Protein backbone atom coordinates (compact mmCIF):
# COMPACT_ATOMS: atom_id res chain seq x y z
CA UNK A 1 0.00 0.00 0.00
CA UNK A 2 1.32 3.44 -0.88
CA UNK A 3 1.78 6.27 1.56
CA UNK A 4 -0.94 8.90 1.72
CA UNK A 5 -0.23 12.19 0.02
CA UNK A 6 0.11 14.88 2.71
CA UNK A 7 -0.69 17.52 0.06
CA UNK A 8 -4.09 15.92 -0.64
CA UNK A 9 -6.72 18.40 0.61
CA UNK A 10 -9.13 15.47 1.13
CA UNK A 11 -6.74 13.46 3.32
CA UNK A 12 -8.50 12.63 6.60
CA UNK A 13 -6.61 13.65 9.71
CA UNK A 14 -6.76 10.08 10.99
CA UNK A 15 -4.73 8.95 7.95
CA UNK A 16 -2.27 11.80 8.48
CA UNK A 17 -1.69 10.81 12.12
CA UNK A 18 -1.59 7.09 11.33
CA UNK A 19 1.22 7.63 8.84
CA UNK A 20 3.05 10.41 10.71
CA UNK A 21 2.24 10.14 14.45
CA UNK A 22 5.03 12.61 15.27
CA UNK A 23 2.74 15.36 13.95
CA UNK A 24 0.42 15.05 16.96
CA UNK A 25 2.40 17.43 19.23
CA UNK A 26 2.24 20.14 16.56
CA UNK A 27 -1.53 20.06 16.86
CA UNK A 28 -1.57 19.87 20.65
CA UNK A 29 0.77 22.88 20.85
CA UNK A 30 -1.94 24.84 19.02
CA UNK A 31 -4.66 23.51 21.34
CA UNK A 32 -6.04 21.41 18.49
CA UNK A 33 -7.29 18.11 19.88
CA UNK A 34 -7.38 16.39 16.49
CA UNK A 35 -5.04 13.48 17.30
CA UNK A 36 -7.29 10.83 18.82
CA UNK A 37 -10.50 12.75 18.10
CA UNK A 38 -13.40 10.54 16.97
CA UNK A 39 -14.08 13.02 14.16
CA UNK A 40 -10.52 12.74 12.73
CA UNK A 41 -11.54 10.11 10.14
CA UNK A 42 -14.02 12.62 8.73
CA UNK A 43 -12.09 15.90 9.04
CA UNK A 44 -9.31 17.21 6.87
CA UNK A 45 -6.67 19.73 7.83
CA UNK A 46 -8.85 22.38 6.21
CA UNK A 47 -11.83 21.37 8.34
CA UNK A 48 -9.82 21.37 11.56
CA UNK A 49 -8.30 24.78 10.92
CA UNK A 50 -11.75 26.17 10.20
CA UNK A 51 -13.17 24.66 13.41
CA UNK A 52 -10.33 26.04 15.51
CA UNK A 53 -10.10 29.38 13.72
CA UNK A 54 -6.45 28.83 12.83
CA UNK A 55 -4.80 29.89 9.58
CA UNK A 56 -4.58 26.79 7.42
CA UNK A 57 -1.60 28.01 5.41
CA UNK A 58 0.45 28.43 8.60
CA UNK A 59 -0.45 24.98 9.93
CA UNK A 60 0.10 23.32 6.55
CA UNK A 61 3.53 24.96 6.22
CA UNK A 62 4.55 23.69 9.65
CA UNK A 63 3.27 20.19 8.86
CA UNK A 64 5.22 20.12 5.59
CA UNK A 65 8.42 21.23 7.36
CA UNK A 66 8.14 18.39 9.86
CA UNK A 67 7.30 15.60 7.42
CA UNK A 68 10.27 13.52 6.34
CA UNK A 69 11.41 14.16 2.82
CA UNK A 70 11.24 11.02 0.72
Image (spheres, rainbow, N blue to C red):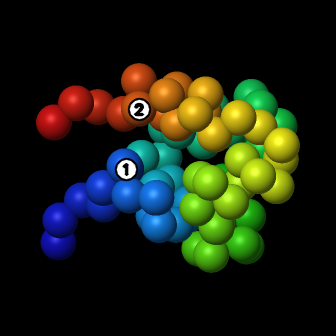
Q: Quadrant of residue 59?
A: top right
Along the viewing direction, whichever of 38 and 61 lies nearer the viewer: 61
Q: Position of residue 52 (x, y in %)?
A: 83, 47
Residue 39 to residue 69: above or below = below
Question: Can you see residue 25?
Answer: no
Mark 2 → mark 1, Cα distance in angstroms: 8 Å
24 to the left or right of 30 = left
Q: Position of residue 24 (x, y in %)?
A: 60, 42
Residue under the point 58% across and 34% down: 57
60 to the left or right of 34 = left
The residue wearing badge 1 is: 6
Residue 15 to residue 38: above or below = above
- Marks 2 and 1: CB-CB under 8 Å? yes
The residue wearing badge 2 is: 64
Residue under the point 61% across and 28% down: 58
Question: Can you see residue 6?
Answer: yes
Along the viewing direction, whichever of 18 and 13 lies nearer the viewer: 13
Amino acid sequence: MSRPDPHDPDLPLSALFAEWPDLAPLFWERNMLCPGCPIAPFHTLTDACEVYGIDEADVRAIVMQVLPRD
